[in-house]
Image (spheres, rainbow, N blue to C red):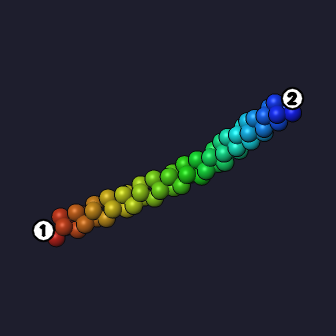
Amino acid sequence: MGKILTAVLGIGVVVGGAYYALNHMGRSSTRESSAQKQQLDNVRQAASRIESDADKRAQELDAKMQLGQ
């Protein structure tokens, strides 16, 4: 009887620990996911800004070249 009770309690502890670990990791990965999404959005904004600056410089150079001819 004691061995069965010990086995049931042991299984309960393992299941409880696994449940806690999975739920805890799920919450932390959501935060990390949100932070990673924010970082990706920042990179996209910076790339867009760099692209628009490059386009503007190219247009200015083209205008200067046309004035020089």
Position of residue 2 in the picture relative to residue 46 (left or right): right
Which residue corresponds to the image point at 54% horizontal and 55% vertical from the top-left? 39
Which residue corresponds to the image point at 67% horizontal and 40% vertical from the top-left? 22
Which residue corresponds to the image point at 16% horizontal and 70% vertical from the top-left? 68
Depth check, mark 1 against mark 2: the one in front is 2
- State which quadrant residue 6 falls in: top right
* Residue 1: numbered disc: 2
Give the quarter of the figure containing the N terminus: top right
Q: Earlier in the sequence, mark 1 or mark 2?
A: 2
Residue extending furthest right? 2
Looking at the rendered structure, the kind of residue marked 2 is Met
- The x, y position of residue 43, in whole percent, is 47, 56
Residue matched to label 1: 69
Q: CA distance from mark 1 to mark 2?
A: 100 Å
Residue extending furthest left? 69
Looking at the rendered structure, the kind of residue marked 1 is Gln
- The x, y position of residue 66, in whole percent, is 18, 64
| Secondary structure of the residue carrying numbered label 1 | loop
Residue 28 or residue 46, whichever sits in front: 28
- The x, y position of residue 26, in whole percent, is 65, 42
- State which quadrant residue 64 falls in: bottom left
Dot 2 crowding, Cα within 10 Å, few <14, some 14–19, many 20+: few
Q: How many marks?
A: 2
Residue 9 seen from this side: no
Q: Is residue 66 above or below residue 41?
A: below
Which residue corresponds to the image point at 54% horizontal and 48% vertical from the top-left? 37
Position of residue 54 in the picture relative to residue 66 (left or right): right
Q: Is residue 43 above or below residue 27?
A: below
| Secondary structure of the residue carrying numbered label 2 | loop
